[in-house]
Image (cartoon, rainbow, N blue to C red):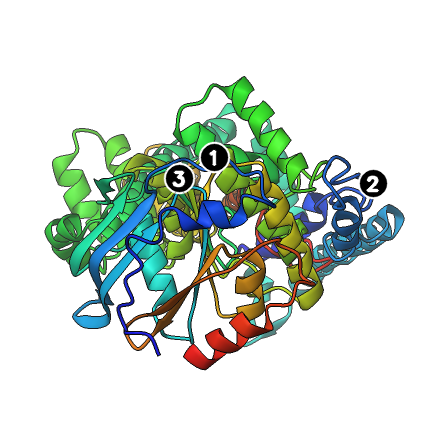
Amino acid sequence: MTAPTASTTGSTTASPAAMTAGTESRRVDAGLAIRLDGVALGYGRRAILEDLRLDIAPGEVLVLVGPSGSGKSTVLRAVAGLLAPHAGRVLAQGVTVSGPSPDRAMIFQDDALLPWRTVRRNVELPLRIRGVPRRERGTVAESWIARVGLAGFEDRLPRELSGGMRQRVQLARSLAGAPRAVLMDEPFGALDAQTRGEMQRLLLDVLHGTSATVVFVTHDVDEALLLADRVVVLRRGGIGSVLSVPGPRTPDVDRAGLRARIIEEL
Amino acid sequence: MSTPALGAADALSPGTATPASGTPGTASPGAGTTGLGATGTASTDDGAAPARTGRGRTAAGARGWAVRLGSLAAFVALWQWLTTADVSAGLRFDRLPSPTEVAAEFARQLGTGTYYLDLAQSTIRIITGFALAAVAGIALGVLVARSRWVADVLLPPIEVVRPIPAIALVPIAILVFPTDEQGIVFITFAAAFFPIMVSTRHAVRALPTLWEDAVRTMGGGRAHVLWNVVLPGTLPGVFGGLSVGMGVAWICVISAEMISGEFGVGYRTWHAYTVVDYPAVLVGMTSIGVLGWVTSASIELLGRRLTRWLPRAEGNTR
């Protein structure tokens, strides 16, 4: 087994882009999007994770997997700036993260849409907060709503939508603000298997047209293998191992070997 | 008694029946995206709840109205019978004016200017006191729930004053306010303030943190969170407080008018009692009942309008 803090620094920065270059046309910037630099996390005095070291390249899709309670969501909240580390630093674009930023949009597992706002007004919200003029807000929001397959539902309230549709709205809302990174906390965890599959395809499809870095948390190994450029396994208070996943991103490619390795890690 | 008004308060609901939430399946989602059209359409099926047909809704509404009006009519008929048959079994209904006597007195008062003046006076008092209480109660409720420091500073005196019935503040109000008018408005304010403040405070505390996290990760600061999450998210709880506040405000404005008013429905009712004019007392009481009903129904209606987004059971219009 790999050493608990299997630091991938050094080998990381180049690999994900090169790995997928043949099958993906996503634009990938040089440099570093997010770095965890000796980060320790916990709630109150209780420590959950110690000395995390991880570099995430711009445009990379990094998936965090781990058993329940391993701290996957905690890592994501720290990257979002919603949770301050006990020790170490989280860096985004080389700058220490000290709070939330529209550069790092977050998609939550639970329905985080504002229930009193229509689909359109939910998607417009990050633009409104950024002070984008009304007309432009409307145009951008509408194009994202159409992009996630919800054209015609702009004036519906969240309560009138199914769970899958609501997650589509969350996806549109997070991307409407043109963030550099999208942090996704088990976004499809509460969906049925069929809807989940649809949402995974939609996500791959939508990400194809952006250059956003993605940090995706899931406990589903198959989901991780489908979406990830790299999979990071969290276990026993640290990073267990980091595995690169070769493309193309289709469900039928056999990744049994990788799958077995991850499951063994877990 | 204000029983007829209470019975009638329920009659409001069919009028506010929510319109059907659009027709499901008419939209064409995802036409532009690869292979998404089908999935989008599939998910619409469980997306929109099937609405009851318009005709069924109207018929049910009419039936509801008939029952409510019938209930009110039965109450008045019982009152008429108890008083005209001189029933005296423990309770001395033979002394009570009958509905026809009250109606005659009401018709007489409608021809006088004083009646309208009294109505207007009480309405202005309640609206002023209640509006001040709503603004102060919501603002303070949010502040003490969101700021530890403000809570430490302001809550101790508030919690000590809170158990004092607003009507017990009358002597103080007479003492410190230059005019009786201001005193009465203050009593009304004090009565409505506490339920509004306490409900707001609880609603803010009960707010899921998820919405706030979402707005913060969009780059929203305190003002954005307050405006886009806290205020709309607490509306259902706040309106609970406003309803209760309006009820208490009426109790107190009428009592304060009885004690120190020179106009107003409460004053007029008490005055009628002192000259032993019971039909006029009952006209006053009925007026208070109807006014109270109209104001709380307005709050209720506004609350439902503003919280349409709340999840609710299918076909349930309440």
Q: Nearer the viewer, mark 1 or mark 3?
A: 3
Where residue B200 sits: x, y (%)? Answer: 35, 51
Q: Can residue B115 be seen in this view?
A: yes
Q: Look at mark 2 in the image and give the residue it sits on.
A: B26
Q: Which amino acid does label 2 sit on?
A: Thr
Q: Percent position (x, y) of residue A160?
A: 67, 50
Q: Is residue A200 above or below residue B219?
A: below
Please report the residue visible at 41 percent of the width from the left and 47 percent of the height from the top: B214
Spot occupied by residue B212 in the image (x, y as percentages of width and height): 37, 48
Query: Can you tell which mark lies on residue A125?
Result: 1
Q: Name the residue under label 3.
A: B218
The amino acid pointed to by label 1 is Leu
Letter of the chain that mark 3 sits on in the rendering: B
Residue A190 is drawn in which quadrant?
A: bottom right
Q: Which chain carries label 2?
A: B
Mark 3 secondary-structure assignment: loop
Specify whether residue B304 is in view: no
Left/right of residue B116 with respect to residue B262 in the rendered view? right
* Contact? badges 1 and 3 (CB < 8 Å): yes
Q: Residue at x 19, y 67 (%)?
A: A44
Q: Which mark is residue A253?
A: none
Residue B228: image x %, image y %?
42, 39
Do tags 1 and 3 sit on the same chain?
no
Residue density around tag 3, few if under 14, some if 14–19, many if 20 or more, within 10 Å? many
Rendering quarter of residue B160: bottom left
In the rendered image, which quarter contains the N terminus of chain A?
Answer: bottom left
In three-dimensional space, the C-alpha distance between marks 2 and 3, rounded to whole angstroms, equals: 32 Å
Q: In which quarter of the image is the C terminus of chain A?
A: bottom left
Give the amino acid type for the residue marked by disc 3 in the picture.
Met
Return the residue nearer the eye: A81 or B44.
A81
Please give the name of the residue rendered at 43% of the width and 37% of the height, measured from the top-left corner.
A179
Mark 2: secondary structure: loop
